[in-house]
Image (tube, rainbow, N blue to C red):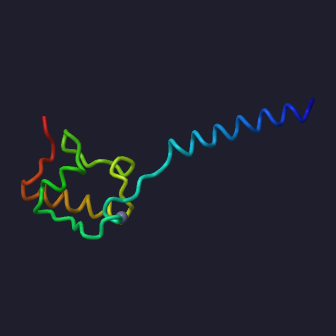
Amino acid sequence: MAMKKNAKRNNKNDYDDDYKFKKIRKKACPLCTDKNVVLDYKNPEQLRKFINERGKILPRRATGACSKHQRDITTAVNRSRNIALLPYSEN
Ligand SMILES: [Zn+2]
């Protein structure tokens, strides 16, 4: 009786763990995976990928970047905004 109950609970936990694992699976940093890509603040086309339609910089959970590269992205976007290649805000 008790064994049956445990087995049932274990199965449920396994299922939950799999589900959570799939949901929180992190994608790799786009700048670490491709070493040839160099962030350039004079290239707004490249930086457009890291801002949303309102002109805000996307958070790390959206860009998938590591902390080092997210910092590089922020610096590049801010430099680009400063020389008016990217907007501070849109709409
Ligand atoms: Zn990285």
From the top left corner, tell me how far across and down residue 16 is, in percent: 64, 38
Looking at the rendering, in which quadrant would you find the N terminus?
top right
Rendered residue at 24%/70% (across/down): 36
Residue at left 40%, top 58%?
28
Q: Which residue is nearer to you in this view: 62 or 90? A: 62
What is the quadrant of the C terminus in the image?
top left
Q: Residue 67: percent from the left, percent from the top? A: 38, 62
Establish if 73 lies above or below 5. Answer: below
Near-viewer residue (74 or 30): 30
Relative to 52, say whether 43 is above or below.
below
* Residue 4, image x, y percentages: 87, 32
Quadrant assignment, res 73: bottom left
Left-right relation of 25 to 87:
right
Q: Residue at x 35, y 47 (%)?
A: 62
Along the horizontal axis of the image, is 43 left or right of 18? left
Q: Is residue 41 left or right of residue 50?
A: left
In the picture provided, is 26 more to the left or to the right than 14? left
- The image position of residue 10, as x and y in percent, is 76, 39
